[in-house]
Image (cartoon, helix red, strand yellow):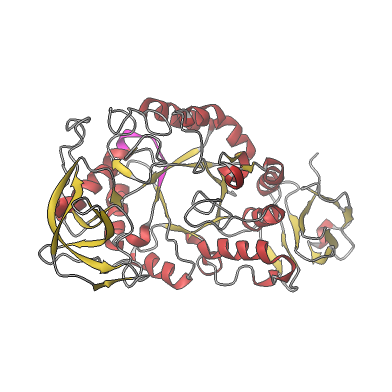
Amino acid sequence: MNFSLMQYFEWYIPDDGKHWDRLRDDAHKIKDMGIDAVWLPPPTKADNPSNPGYSVYDVYDLGEFDQKGAVRTKYGTREQLENAIKACKEAGLMVYLDLVMNHKAGGDETETFKVIEVDPDDRNKEISEPFDIEGYTRFTFPGRKGKYSTFEWDFTHFVGVDYDAKEDRTGVFKIVGEDKDWSDNVDEEHGNFDYLMFADIYYDHPAVKEEMIEWGKWLTDTLDVDGFRLDAVKHIDSQFISDFIDAVTEHADRDIYFFGEFWNPEVEAKEGFLEDVEFDIDLFDVGLHYNLFGASNEREDYDLSKIFQGTLVEESPWNTVTFVDNHDTQPGESLESFIEDWFKQSAYALILLRRDGYPCVFYGDYYGIDGEGEESKVGMPEVIDPLLHARHLRALGEQEDYFDHADTIGWVRFGEEEVEGSGCAVVVSNGLEDGVKKMYVGEERSGEEWVDFTGNREDKITIDDEGFGEFISNSQSVSVYALPDE
């Protein structure tokens, strides 16, 4: 079966506390589109109710307690979340939650402690002697009053901060403590990329490790979800990630799926992390995203035959989530690298209609982006729907690639015997002229007339006696040929 995932949020969805209600109302429609699972934004309380959730404050507050200015999160209350999850289950959708475990934000009180300032471009390079700062590292959660967990956080539970309230200045400040240092088991960018933002959690502290693992168990008991997307895993000690996955999986009475964001396009770095966690997690294919971005910018100058070179899906297909865009790559965000509209359908064909990878459809591409000016985008369901339809009915079975031309590539899915009418032929072109690709689909298909599921072309392609078809794509477009629906 071809499973498909939808990232059910974008950065600028309305700050009205009704997003969980939208999911509840959309659940059956999403399933009917051909989506099998939804990835939800962080459900935990952030440092303010308008934050998308990545500035996490209290992981035990799912929109239940009056903290940081509201009971609800940006997306709604715990009750609304539970109702949305229930609706998804009734519709046959799996549900994955986004977990932010790298840092905490919005501390309740400051503390004075010693730090050493480091070079932001090389965190192994110390640029000061130890000195005192005031940091927002005291987390007491007065609104929750110890419900679910009595654990309170202080500076000993963190390894770095980026703000000194005493001098009102920012920097990267490593907290001084006995044998305390950045973790070795993180990405090597900037010398050591343990520190990302806010108060950075110190996973070498036994009490911290125990608390976060107990929270993971609590979450699996509290919400009927099927898995977790782990944010910013390249900044978190990989040994902790492995221990967290093992403990939560052993505790749960059901299968739990884990996938993570390791934002580094280099395959070697991601494969190193996968080895550290014993391949118990899938990772987003950042390299493929940047290849798609390059292709959309360079247009006819991009060599499509190399679109999968240097990608995780090519090297480790069973541990890969493929995607076109997400909340970080959308216009105006920190990793902005948004795929141009002209190439969007081709990009989705390259993840939805192929054998390998777990493809993820972005909410902003489907429903639109609710930003202002250039950060606003109209949704493109008419571009994505035909591909989802073809994915579930036609893009099945073995695959043969025709990546033999710089501006026109294609592939064939031969179908599965038990799925009547399955099989398809896909042609992607970025050239200034129509792309043509002669491809073998099977002698048993001789005489069949195939049509373009995208509707981009009205051709009826007749399969010849030897099982070949001459399939055509418009200039800088994509076509997906298969037997028409009855």
The part of the image, by quadrant, that contains residue 440 is: bottom right
Image location (x, y in percent) of residue 387: 69, 48
Q: Is residue 341 magenta?
A: no
Viewer-nearest residue: 111 or 31: 111
Q: Is residue 193 above or below residue 329?
A: below
Pick out the residue farthest to the front: 167
Q: Considering the image in quadrants, where does the C terminus appear?
A: top right
Q: Is residue 299 above or below residue 191?
A: above
Image location (x, y in percent) of residue 211: 20, 46
- Say whether residue 252 is left or right of residue 375: left
- Say whether residue 462 is left or right of residue 204: right
Residue at the spot 15% in from the left edge and 37% down from the top edge: 150
- Say whether residue 56 is left or right of residue 160: right
Residue at the spot 69% in from the left edge and 56% down from the top edge: 343
Q: Which residues are magenta?
A: 221-228
Residue at the spot 67% in from the left edge and 46% down from the top edge: 384
Viewer-nearest residue: 79 or 116: 116
Q: Is residue 223 magenta?
A: yes
Q: Is residue 380 above or below residue 88?
A: below
The part of the image, by quadrant, that contains residue 159 is: bottom left
Viewer-nearest residue: 409 or 277: 409
- Say whether residue 72 is left or right of residue 441: left
The part of the image, by quadrant, that contains residue 270 is: bottom left
Q: Is residue 4 visible?
A: no
Residue at the spot 48% in from the left edge and 39% down from the top edge: 94
Q: How many labels were placed on the picture? A: 0
